[in-house]
Image (cartoon, grey):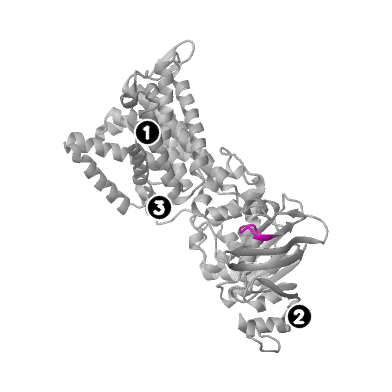
Amino acid sequence: MPMSRPSRPYLVEALTLLGLIAAPYVLPYLGFTPTTINRILIWGLVGIGFDLLFGYAGLLSFGQSAFFGTGGMFAAYLLTQTEFTNTIAAVVVGTIVAGIVGYLVGLIALRRTGIYFAMITVAIAEVFFFLEFNPLSAYTGGENGLPGVPTPNLELGFTTIEFDDNFSMYIFLAFWYFVGLVVALRIVRSPVGLLLRAIRDNPLRAQALGHDIHGYKLTVFVVAAMYAGFAGGLLGLMQGFMPPDAFMFHTSGEIIMQTAIGGAGTLFGPLLGAATWLYLADFFQTTLNLGATWKLVLGIVFVLLVVFLRRGLAGAIIDLYHMARGGTKPAQGTSASAPARGAASASAAHTIVPMPARRRPAAAGSGAILQASGLSKRYGGLIANRDIDFSVNRGEIRGIIGPNGAGKTTFFKMLTCEVQPTSGTITFEGRDITHFGVTDVCQLGLTKSYQINQLFDRLSVRQNLAIAALGETRGKFKLDLFRSLRKVPGLSARVESTAALVHLSERLESPVSELAYGEKRRLEIGLALATSPSLLLLDEPLAGMSPQERVETVALLKSIAQGRTMIVIDHDMDSLFELVEKVTVLQEGSVLVEGTPEQIKNDPKVQEAYLGGVHGELAFGEIA
C-alpha cells in the first residue's frame, strides 16, 4: 500500500473554493456585514500561520501581534511615506520583513520550551508594542497609526484593477486566503508537516530518530510570522489605515482564542473561530447593545465553547461527519480482532523478512564497531558509571545485565549520546562521537529503542514508521516544504518493509493509541529499525510482556539480528541468553565481568552480585 494517499487529493481545495464563492451571498442573510466578512478572511489568514505553529508543531506563541503589526506597518509606511505605489509588492515586502524579524525572534525564543517559550513570546510582543508607541512613533504614527493607506490595486500594464468597494475587496482577500490555505495544505502534506506533528507529540523521540527539531521549529516559527505579516499588510489595505492596536497583546490573545474556538490542527479552525468571534462581538455590541459588558459575555461564551467542544468547531464537524458515516474514524485499522492479529504475528514470528535497503553503506570488516574507553558519569557526588571499557564487534549480539541500580540505563544513554559522559571517550566506526548529539549519532547509524515506549500516539503506525525512515532518507534537516510525502524516494518501501519485519503490516493505518501493548513494543523496535542503523541498542525490549509475547519477540529479535550488530539490556535472562553471544555484567556502575552466557551463569562474581554469595549455577529464569 502506498504512503497514505488521499482518494480525492484536491477535495479540500475544491470545497474551500466553493465556500469562498458562496460566502458573500449567504453570510449576509445570517447577519454578517460585508466589512465583518472581509475581516474574517484576514483573521483566518493570520490564524492559518498560528495553527501551523500551535496546532501542528505544538508551540504556543503569544507574540503573533509583533509580526502582524510589523508586516502591516512596514507595508503601510512604504505606501504612505514613500513614493512606493504598488500595493501588492508593499505587502510582500512587509511579509519578508516580518519573516526576518520572526527568524531573529525565533533564535531567542526557541532556546526554551513549554511555558518558558510562551513567556518569552509575551515579552517579545510587549517589546514591539513599546517600540511602536515610543522610539519608532515617527515611522509608525504612534498612537495615531498610519492613515491614508491606499486600497489594493493590480497593475496589468494595459490597465489597473482597483479593489475599492466591499465586494471587490472580498474577491481580493478571498483570493489571498485561498492561496494561503493551499500553501499551508502543501506544507502539512509534506515531510516537514509530518515532522512538525512528531515534534508536537514527542520532540525528544523525533530528535533521537535523527531530526534537527530546532531547525524545523525555527522554520515553522518564521512561516507563522510571515502569515501574520502578510495578513497585517492586508488589514491596512482593507481599512485604509494601519491601526496601532495591531501590536497590542490582546491581538495575540484574539488569535489564540479564535484558533481554540475553531479547532487547532485543522487549518480551517481559525476561519471558523474568527467568524464566530467577530459575529458574536458585533451581535453583542450592535444588536444587544451590551456596551462595555460585551467582552465579559464573549469571554463566558469562549469558555463554554472550549469546555464543551474540546476539539473546537472544526473538530465537532469532523466528529459529526464520521458519525453520519456510521461511526468510522480516520486511520482505522483492519477489522480483524486483536487475538486474530496476535495469532498471525505468532505464526509469522519465525519468518525472516529482509531489512530495508540502506542509503548508508555498511562498513566492511569484522573489527570493533563501537568502543568506549574510561567512560564515567557523575551527577554531583553520585557516580552512575565508573571507568567502563567496552567494545562490540561488527555483527555481534551483546547482552548487558546487572542488578537494579547498576548503571545500565545511564551507560546506554551515554553510548547513544543522550547523556554526555563526565570523562572517557566513545568511538563509533572509527569516529570519536563522545561530544556528538543524539541526532548526529542516529544519522551515523547508531540508534536505540526505549525501555518505556516513546511513540507518536496521536499518529498512525504508518506515520510513526515514516517519521523514523525520513531521518535516514532525507538527513537531519531539509526544507522540502512543498514536496508530497508520497514522492519521497523509497519511503513507502522502507515503511512497509519495516512493518513486515515487526509484524505490523495489518496495522499500518491504525492509530498507535489503539495498539495492544505487545504491538506497541514491536513498533518501538520498528522505529529504531526504520532508521537503518548499523548498531541497534535495545533497552529492555521484553519489559512488561506476557510469556507468549516474550516468545514471539525473542523470535522477532533473532530474525532482525541477522547481519546486524545489536546490544540488548533485559532482565529476562533466559530469553537474553538465548539471543546473545556475549554478556557484559555491570555492578555499581562498573564492568564486573564479561563472557559467554554459559560462563556468566557459572561465574562466582555474578552469583555474588545477584544472590549474595549463593553458589552453584544460577536459575536465571527465576531471578528475572
- Label 1 amino acid? Phe
Q: Which residues are magenta?
A: 415-423
Residue 260: give x, y in percent of width and height.
36, 46
Q: CA distance from mark 2 to mark 1?
A: 72 Å
Q: Is residue 439 left or right of residue 87?
A: right
In terms of secondary structure, where does tag 1 sit? helix
Asked whether 418 falls inside the magenta stretch, the response is: yes
- Residue that badge 3 annotates: 322
In terms of secondary structure, where does tag 2 sit? helix
Q: Which mark is residue 160?
A: none
Instruction: Please name whichever residue, 578 or 96, is drawn nearer the observer in this view of the structure.
Output: 96
Extreme-left residue of the structure: 289
- Label 2 amino acid? Gln
Give the mark nearer the N terminus: 3 vs 2. Answer: 3
Mark 2 burial class by Cα count in 10 Å: few <14, some 14-19, many 20+:
some
Residue 94: give x, y in percent of width and height.
46, 26
User: Looking at the image, can residue 341 be seen?
Assistant: yes
- Residue that badge 1 annotates: 129
Q: CA distance from mark 1 to mark 3?
A: 44 Å
Q: Is residue 253 left or right of residue 488?
A: left
Q: Is residue 242 left or right of residue 96?
A: left
- Give the total of numbered labels: 3
- Residue that badge 2 annotates: 599
**Residue at 52% across / 50% down in the picture?**
199
**Magenta span main SS:** loop
Mark 3 burial class by Cα count in 10 Å: few <14, some 14-19, many 20+:
some
In which quadrant will I find the C terminus?
A: bottom right
Give the mark nearer the N terminus: 1 vs 3. Answer: 1
Instruction: Please name whichever residue, 423 or 245, is drawn nearer the observer in this view of the structure.
Output: 423
